[in-house]
Image: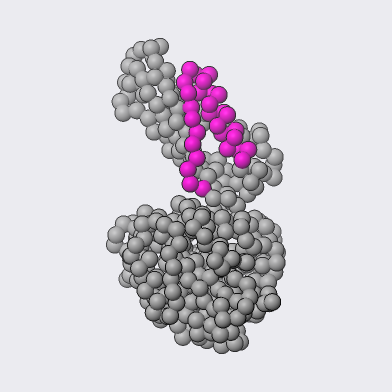
């Protein structure tokens, strides 16, 4: 099968892929609570002759190929939405107070489209393609949950690929950007600091222990981690986003709860910041006669792009789309006069990348001058559906080419 044939077949599926995307967009669900989305995806897979298998709390896996011996290539799409009320001017907007503001409906529809392409050419697959439909990406838990449930085994996965649509990019819809080797998305950690004091009347502060005073000093002190304890090339961001305490202006509260997040591009830096965050919080609280505890919730490691996959996928995508519609991050940096190949947004496909050779591709899905200027996670963000058949073709073609190049 030639690249031209596959692109043509993907273009012929456009109405189908768009229909699936809009059905998902109108009925968004969040986290692991995605029963309607799961039913929809399973039904579509069954209709095309595939056998969906449950994986973890709310994941689905399906296999295509296996008629010939060979390796296993995984393609991933996330399915969950965000707890955002949609304000986008589209005639298929969500009405349930949730929204596919990060384009996961696009990802799911594109992978369903790729499944149709791969099923039509199943006899040509030099190995097996494993389709991964994942929940709970937005809370950084879905990928890890599926791995724990055996995602990467039976059959054992040899390499993996994900695509993420990007709105507001200055490239025609359907342009693909291949990540450079190495880390392209930071680790993320969410944490909570609880400062325990002793509540009392505001007129008698000497009879209590003020946790707000301790929390204020902790807030200032942890900024020194970045300013004085990290090297200049240790890229990291530590943010306190919430501080909650008290219900009355004349009462010193019993405790304060602070919530925040950490983003890092290096696992050693990540561990160091977490350690110092606990040490500083506990030490300062004690100095004000209180106590502090730090707990970490959901998070994900750094996303690491495999060098060989990066090189291979850049060539495959250029062969499929032409050099004018496919670029490496290195080429983009050179065209723009420098810059960073790293994204500030975390991605829980990182868990997969820590286990098997992996690659992340970005798919331009809306130019600002064409009305797609709002960024991901904004209530008015829109995505250009011209990218949909391209995404399906890229998913299918890269898997086919990689398996053919690595056949026994």
Q: Which of 235 and 160 lies nearest the eye of the viewer?
A: 160
- Was residue 228 drawn as part of the magenta stretch in this picture? no
Instruction: Work out whether 240 lies above or below 159.
Output: above
Q: Is residue 178 left or right of residue 33?
A: right
Task: Identify the image quadrant of residue 325.
Answer: bottom right
Q: Is residue 152 left or right of residue 50?
A: right
> Total label count?
0
Expressed as whole percent of the image width and height from the top left, the position of residue 406 reads 68, 75
Q: Which quadrant of the figure contains the N terminus? A: bottom right
Expressed as whole percent of the image width and height from the top left, the position of residue 97 reads 31, 57
Expressed as whole percent of the image width and height from the top left, the position of residue 385 reads 45, 74
- Was residue 281 drawn as part of the magenta stretch in this picture? yes
Expressed as whole percent of the image width and height from the top left, the position of residue 402 reads 64, 74
Q: Residue at x 48, y 55 (%)?
A: 145
Q: Residue at x 65, y 47 (%)?
A: 266
Q: Which of 257 and 336 lies nearest the eye of the viewer?
A: 257
Q: Which of 349 and 121 lies nearest the eye of the viewer?
A: 121
Q: Residue at x 59, y 70 (%)?
A: 73
Residue 82 shows up from this direction: no
Q: How is the image coloured?
A: one colour
């Amino acid at each position: 099968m030639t690249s031209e044939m596959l692109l043509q077949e993907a273009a012929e599926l456009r109405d189908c892929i768009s229909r699936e995307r809009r059905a998902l967009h109108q009925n968004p669900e969040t986290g692991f609570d995605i029963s309607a989305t799961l039913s929809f995806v399973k039904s579509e897979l069954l209709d095309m002759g595939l056998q969906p298998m449950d994986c973890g709390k709310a994941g689905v896996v399906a296999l295509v190929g296996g008629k010939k011996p060979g390796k296993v290539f995984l393609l991933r799409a996330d399915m969950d939405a965000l707890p955002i009320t949609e304000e986008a001017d589209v005639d298929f907007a969500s009405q349930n107070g949730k929204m596919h503001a990060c384009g996961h409906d696009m990802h799911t529809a594109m992978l369903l489209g790729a499944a149709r392409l791969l099923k039509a050419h199943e006899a040509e697959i030099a190995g097996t393609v494993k389709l991964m439909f994942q929940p709970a990406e937005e809370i950084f838990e879905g990928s890890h949950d599926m791995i724990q449930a055996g995602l990467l085994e039976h059959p054992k996965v040899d390499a993996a690929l994900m695509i993420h649509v990007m709105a507001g990019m200055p490239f025609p819809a359907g342009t693909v950007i291949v990540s450079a080797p190495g880390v392209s998305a930071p680790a993320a950690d969410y944490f909570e600091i609880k400062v325990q004091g002793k509540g009392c009347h505001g007129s008698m502060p000497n009879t209590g222990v003020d946790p707000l005073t301790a929390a204020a000093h902790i807030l200032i002190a942890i900024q020194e981690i970045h300013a004085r304890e990290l090297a200049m090339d240790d890229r990291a961001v530590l943010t306190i986003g919430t501080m909650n305490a008290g219900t009355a202006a004349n009462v010193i509260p019993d405790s304060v709860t602070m919530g925040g997040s950490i983003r890092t591009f290096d696992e050693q830096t990540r561990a160091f910041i977490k350690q110092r965050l606990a040490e500083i919080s506990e030490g300062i609280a004690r100095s004000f006669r209180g106590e502090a505890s730090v707990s970490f919730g959901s998070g994900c490691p750094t996303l690491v792009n495999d060098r060989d996959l990066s090189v291979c996928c850049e060539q495959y995508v250029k062969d499929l789309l032409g050099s004018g519609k496919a670029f490496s991050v290195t080429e983009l940096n050179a065209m723009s006069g420098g810059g960073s190949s790293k994204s500030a947004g975390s991605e829980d496909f990182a868990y997969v990348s820590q286990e098997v050779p992996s690659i992340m591709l970005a798919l331009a899905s809306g130019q600002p001058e064409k009305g797609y200027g709002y960024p991901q996670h904004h209530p008015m963000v829109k995505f250009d559906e011209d990218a949909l058949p391209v995404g399906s073709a890229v998913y299918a073609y890269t898997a086919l080419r990689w398996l053919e190049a690595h056949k026994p």
